[in-house]
Amino acid sequence: MTMSHPQSYEILIVPEFTDDKAPGTGNDATGASIRGAAAKGSKGWNPGAAVRSAVVTATGETGETGYPRYAGDGMVADIDPRTRAVEGLLVDGSELAYGLAARVTERDANG
């Protein structure tokens, strides 16, 4: 059976920084809310800055979000194959910690 979505992704857990005007310290400081430049795909995000990664493969199930479910290396994720957005994620059975974001890269069929 051929599936219409990728069979494997690599999920990168990265710190999420901001460029908004949340409270900070010092002159012209910005804050540390979790929505900002890195979340918007700015040049501030560096794939090498991942604090954890996992290769997840399709389980053949649909997650609670309605998107295909992927699992592996301690992570379970619902990923929208069209946008490659992580719509739901558990890391070692828990939700992602505040201040972290998930990014995905598609894996080829050979791993």
Image: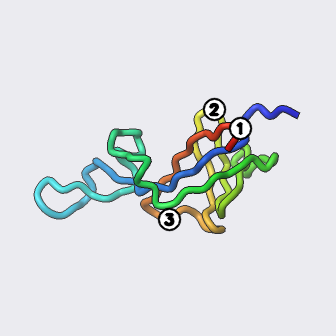
Q: Are marks 2 and 1 in contact (CB under 8 Å)?
A: no
Which sits earlier in the primary sequence, circle 2 or circle 1? Answer: 2
Q: Residue furthest right?
A: 1
Give the image location of residue 81, x and y in percent. 66, 36
Give the CA separation, mark 3 to mark 1: 31 Å
Which mark, by number, is residue 109?
Answer: 1
Q: Which residue is mark 2?
A: 82
The kind of residue on which mark 2 rests is Arg
Checking the image for residue 97, the label placed there is: 3
Marks 3/2: CA distance? 25 Å
Q: What element does badge 2 sit on?
A: loop
Image depth: mark 3 or mark 1 in front: 1
Q: Amino acid at mark 1?
A: Ala
Residue 53 position in % (x across, y down): 55, 56
Query: Which circle, 2 or 1, is nearer the viewer?
Result: 1
Would you identify the image quadrant in which residue 15 lies?
A: bottom left
Residue 8: x, y in percent?
A: 69, 44
